Image (cartoon, rainbow, N blue to C red):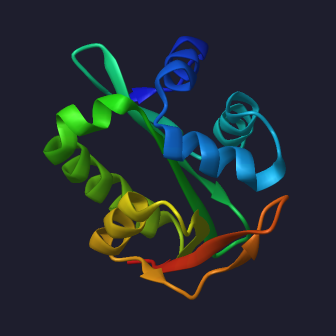
């Protein structure tokens, strides 16, 4: 895990998975780069998961209020080459987020089936999809209690 810097952000933007780009850009209508930079800037502990010099994913958690955290993640095409270690790192990082917050909440694009499966594996409860974002695309609210 590495702290996030401009070089790593640029690498993520250049190599982000297509589904991640769509999801990020649907939120507020910003470019994936601006949405990522805003997420990094507001996060408590933004990190990059790097293997063999390649960024696999970048993530962090925003503090919504005194009890609620908002986790986010963007993955790159390298995630498929490092699937198992990615899952281990995600599990570890989500546990840290759960220690910082009483509850984690966010929304995930209903079309992004790989992300929905991964989030369920991490223990998130997925709720019925609702219109969300600038164009009202369907997103699943998700929640996970803290430790």
How many marks do you count on the picture?
0
What residue is rendered at 63% in x and 76% in y?
67
Note whether 140 is above or below 51 in the view shown: below
Can residue 43 be seen from the camera position used here? Answer: no
The N terminus - image quarter? top left
Q: Position of residue 122 (x, y in %)?
A: 31, 69
Note whether 60 is above or below 58 in the view shown: below
Q: Position of residue 146 (x, y in %)?
A: 44, 77
What residue is rendered at 67% in x and 72% in y?
138
Pick the residue in front: 103 or 86: 86
Note whether 119 is above or below 129 in the view shown: above
Note whether 60 is above or below 110 in the view shown: above
Q: Position of residue 145 (x, y in %)?
A: 46, 82
Asked which quadrant contains residue 120, the reply is bottom left
What residue is rendered at 19% in x and 51% in y?
88
Q: Position of residue 29 (x, y in %)?
A: 83, 46
Q: On the picture, is 39 further left or further right than 29? A: left
Can residue 41 be seen from the camera position used here? Answer: yes
The C terminus - image quarter? bottom left
| Residue farthest toward the bottom in the current orientation of the protein | 128
What residue is rendered at 76% in x and 70% in y?
132
């Amino acid at each position: 895990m590495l702290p996030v810097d401009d070089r790593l952000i640029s690498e993520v933007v250049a190599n982000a998975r297509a589904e991640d780009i769509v999801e990020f850009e649907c939120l507020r209508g910003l470019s994936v780069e601006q949405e990522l930079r805003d997420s990094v800037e507001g996060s408590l502990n933004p990190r990059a998961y790097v293997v063999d010099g390649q960024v696999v994913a970048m993530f962090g958690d925003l503090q919504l209020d005194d009890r609620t955290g908002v986790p986010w993640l963007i993955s790159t095409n390298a995630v498929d080459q490092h699937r198992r270690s990615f899952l281990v790192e995600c599990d570890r990082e989500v546990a840290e987020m759960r220690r910082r917050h009483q509850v984690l909440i966010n929304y995930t694009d209903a079309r992004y089936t790989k992300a929905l499966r991964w989030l369920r594996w991490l223990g998130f409860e997925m709720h019925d999809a609702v219109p969300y974002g600038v164009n009202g695309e369907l997103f699943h609210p998700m929640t996970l209690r803290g430790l």
